[in-house]
Image (spheres, rainbow, N blue to C red):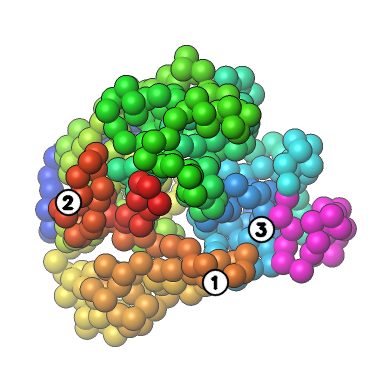
Amino acid sequence: MKGFDGTSVHYSTASGCFHGNWTTETHLDVVSQQSFPHYRNGFKVGMRLEGIDPLHPSMFCVLSVAEVIGFRLRLHIDGFSECYNFWLNADSPDIRPVGWCESTGHKLQPPKGYRANEFNWEKYLEATNAQAAPKTLFKSQNTTLKFQVGMKLEAVDRKNPCLVCVATVADVVDNRFLVHFDNWDDTYDYWCDASSPYIHPVGWCLEHSRPLTAPQGHPNPENFLWEEYLEDSGSSAVPSQAFCMRPPHGFQVNMRLEAVDRRNPMLIRVATIVDTEDYRVKIHFDGWHEKFDFWVDSDLPDLHPVGWCARTGHPLEPPLRLSDLKSSVTQGVCPTPGCKGVGHIKGAKYTGHHSAFGCPYSDMNLKKEVVLPDRLGGEKQITFVPVHFVQKTRRLCADEEEVKEEEDGHIETRWAGQ
């Protein structure tokens, strides 16, 4: 394999704390499941676009490009604090050109201070002296799905993975649809396609002897019946033939890759697969303590093959060395071993830190969830940086309740029968 500079990349299966000088020729294994982009990132800082708010997946918002690094973008939700900024790849299906919502019948949430029925893109671009991102920069897939808005299904609650719940197709865009859990707010929603292992046809729980979580407020959750619910709600089930679960991934333990640091998403680090499940992998950042390891879905856009950073012009954080652990303490930056003072536990609003209080890797923040006030107002708080690391958590699986070591990390309280 060759990078942009034409140099060959060789691979080994070395692991553990790295000694000496690191190069792409000495420390990596190929991970081929993710692909390289076929074009360069054409987005520029200041360009405007429309896109999904990751903390409110049902909402399309007015966005600005706040930063461009390689093939990645940091996006700002216009009118709101920078603490809600988020990173994604330039080919993400979550972003759309200016005017997309109007042309597809989707509601666009305008910047704070604007009324939805009065917002006008042409006037807004003129007022902000901004440019709309060219439509040629956006990736689109015109695919026909058998999933239709309003249809019912059973779906795994991604924030409480032991729960399978009554759900509805809330939106359909290209080859993806939005899963919404009946009578719950949209912070639990997620986008997926027909091959997702987290969605099932109506009746799947009964067939597999799994408990099904009824909609919140259901009068008789213990005796929920699909036939009655479909009739009462005037809805239909997603056809069983619409589901086509993808085969398990091909990642293997000790494969190398490049992965976004979820606690400091402006950074991409050299990483290793240290454990696998059918549809998930456990990521370890080379040279770092295993307490920073975390589980993610194998198709996560934040996982990249070896050489991705070199090919796209994105900086790659090399494995941590013993000398790095010692130097951080003596250089007058963050006291956390290995941390260079880059990033902040409270997100993109702060670009750096000098103390354990703001460090994403400090012991005081490692097991702490960062919650933000809901930008839409009210008293609700939303988890911004979930705890993805090994911890004691309470789970409800099948008919028994148990306390165990859970490596999936963040589990919110939403139990069957609530």
Residue 114 in the magenta stretch? The answer is yes
Could you tell whether 304 is left or right of 404 in the image?
right
Q: What stretch is highlighted in magenta?
A: 108-129
Q: Which image quadrant for residue 343?
A: bottom left
The answer, for residue 11, to whether it is visible in the render is no
**Cα distance in 3D space between marks 3 and 1:** 27 Å
Q: Which image quadrant for residue 162?
A: top left
The spot of residue 56 in percent (x, y) is 56, 53
In this view of the protein, which residue sits in the foreground, 242 or 236? 236
Instruction: Provide the residue designation for mark 3.
Output: 64
* x 31%, y 36%: residue: 211
Query: Does dot 2 land on a helix, a strand or a loop?
Result: strand
Could you tell whether 250 is left or right of 180 in the image?
left
Quarter holding the N terminus is top left
Q: Is 157 rendered above or below residue 317? A: above
* x 63%, y 29%: residue: 234
Instruction: Provide the residue designation for mark 2.
Output: 402
